[in-house]
Image: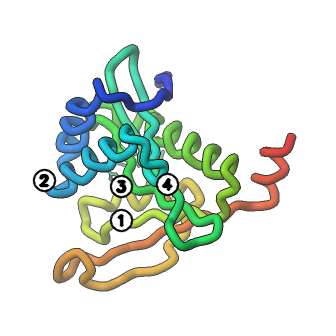
Amino acid sequence: MSCSLRPVGRAHRAPLERLTRATGLFREDEVATAVELLDDSLAGDDDYRFVGAFERDTLIGYACWGPTPGTEGTWDLYWIAVDPARQGQGVGTQLLVDVERRVLADGGRLIVVETSSRADYAPTRGFYERRGYTRAAIIPGYYAPGDDLVIYTKERTDGDLARAAS
Ligand SMILES: CC(C)(COP(=O)(O)OP(=O)(O)OC[C@H]1O[C@@H](n2cnc3c(N)ncnc32)[C@H](O)[C@@H]1OP(=O)(O)O)[C@@H](O)C(=O)NCCC(=O)NCCS
């Protein structure tokens, strides 16, 4: 499916909140955090960057990422979400590839993604694994008893650098 990738503006604040909630995966405090990060980003905080996927003017997905404080070239992918009605059509991949391209352009070396071990996150873990992310660490019981933190990473390769230079 073809969509355009553009910045997420103030007008998309409510749609972003609705979309995040509609995935059914995030708790209300997590939904609120996504909106707060957008507010920080719109207020000029460069630690949080957003890109949206749009079908005409409708926000159908977004990603939020930024440089990890206190590191050299490590970047966090904080958030990626696609409207449930549009999932499985390549929108998430387009967003992820765009974030990776921007991180590389900004001299990034390592991308870190945190997710959950819960069964309802299995498609999400598969999504990262099939796109070259390696399960780097697990913290058992991090989110809740029986709900582990799973940390995925993807490292810049020489091939990435050659492509970026050409
Ligand atoms: C994970 C997510 C961003 C992927 O976006 P997407 O647009 O569905 O991704 P794509 O269409 O590019 O790729 C779909 C792939 O992800 C998997 N997938 C993950 N969740 C899926 C879903 N709900 N429906 C269909 N496919 C899903 C598919 O198995 C498919 O894998 P494959 O292409 O390697 O066979 C999206 O499913 C989503 O918003 N999920 C809920 C929120 C979430 O988990 N965010 C990450 C938090 S850590």
**Which of the 4 image quadrants contains residue 118?**
bottom left
Among all residues in the image, which is located at the extreme left? Answer: 28
**Which of the 4 image quadrants contains residue 8?**
top left
Q: Is residue 68 left or right of residue 109?
A: left
Tell me whether the residue at label 3 lies in contact with that at label 1, contact meaning CB atoms closer than 8 angstroms. Answer: no
Instruction: Indicate the amino acid at tag 3.
Output: Pro
Decide which of tag 3 and tag 2 comes sooner along the chain: 2
- Report the residue marked by disc 1: 115
**Which of the 4 image quadrants contains residue 109?**
bottom right
Q: CA distance from mark 1 to mark 2?
A: 17 Å
Q: Residues within 10 Å of mark 3 (few under 14, many from 20)?
A: few
Residue at image x 17%, y 82%?
Answer: 145
Q: Relative to residue 70, is residue 126 depicted above or below?
A: above
Disc 2 Cβ-to-ligand 1 distance below 8 Å: no
Q: Relative to residue 75, is residue 6 depicted above or below?
A: above
Q: Nearer the viewer, residue 32 or 149?
A: 32
- Depth check, mark 3 against mark 2: the one in front is 2
Q: Residues within 10 Å of mark 1 (few under 14, many from 20)?
A: some
Decide which of tag 4 and tag 2 comes sooner along the chain: 2
- Report the residue marked by disc 2: 28
Decide which of tag 3 and tag 1 comes sooner along the chain: 1
